[in-house]
Image (tube, rainbow, N blue to C red):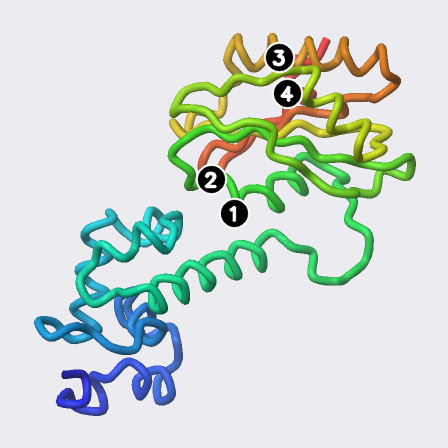
Amino acid sequence: MVRDLSEDEQPRERLMRFGTESLTDSELLAILVRTGSRKMNVIDTCRTMLQHFGGLHKLVRKNWRELRVIEGVADVKAITLEAAFELSRRLQSGNGSGKPLFFKTPDDVASYFGPRLRDLQTEQFLVVFMNAAKAVTGHQVISKGGKTATVVDPAEVMRQAIMNEANSIIIVHNHPSGNRRASRADISITKKLIQAGEMLDIKVDDHIIIAGYDHVSMRAEGLMG
């Protein structure tokens, strides 16, 4: 049991005495999980969880149902972990000021959506909606695909843009492979969206590809015609 460890070995006491930086990933997780199972204390349970899912980056993408496969992690613990992971992503991507959000550069877009997309194992294609003043009014996931591609319907993109009263949009999607280079399919769908937007007077400002901790702007690369 954790209580049988010396104070210098117990995660909560170590955090209070030495700060969060002194704790391992498994020890930080143990503070959230709180208790282990009959076979393992909470630190060993969390160490097993990290090993099972392949490390922290992959663990934080698991939902509460997937987390329950670890012995000692029941519904409440799994839900607590998923909520903590989502809060972390929101803190990383949010502007936190309560003021209107503006994306002035591709880096701004990548900073906001990178935490949401960089660790996904499948492609997600989303659209960012902006008003006439270029303030972000929302975003919508349009499609989810496989590891190498996702199917996007230009009509659905424009339908969502109209429903959100967007004057312009930014396209964002991820490359799970980590290769930031735009594919032929990326270039093709971007051109189709530009053409569809021209008919509806909705400008496609950019298409940002998130590839791990890297990203690329298709407009900056001259791939938007």
Residue 151 lies, in percent from the top left, at: 52, 17
> Residue under circle 3?
189
Q: Is residue 113 depicted above or below 47 in this figure?
A: above
Residue 218 lies, in percent from the top left, at: 64, 20
Of tags 3 and 4, which is closer to the observer? 3
The residue at 67%/34% (across/down) is: 106
Of tags 1 and 4, which is closer to the observer? 1
Residue 190 lies, in percent from the top left, at: 65, 14
Mark 4 or mark 2, earlier in chain = 2
Farthest residue to the right: give it. 132
Label disc, if present, on residue 6 of the rendered structure: none
Label disc, if present, on residue 218 of the rendered structure: 4
Q: Quadrant of residue 37?
A: bottom left
Q: Are marks 2 and 3 in contact (CB under 8 Å)?
A: no
In the image, taking residue 151 as reference, residue 197 lies left or right, namely right
Of tags 2 and 3, which is closer to the observer? 3
In the image, taking residue 109 as reference, residue 165 lies left or right, namely right
The crowd level at tag 3 (other Cα within 10 Å; few <14, some 14-19, many 20+) is some
> Residue under circle 1?
115
Q: Quadrant of residue 147?
A: top left
What's under tag 2, amino acid-wise? Arg
> Residue under circle 2?
118
Tell me how far mark 1 sits from mark 4, CA to CA: 20 Å
Tell me how far mark 3 sits from mark 1, CA to CA: 24 Å
Q: Is residue 88 depicted above or below 157 in this figure?
A: below
Q: Quadrant of the N terminus?
A: bottom left
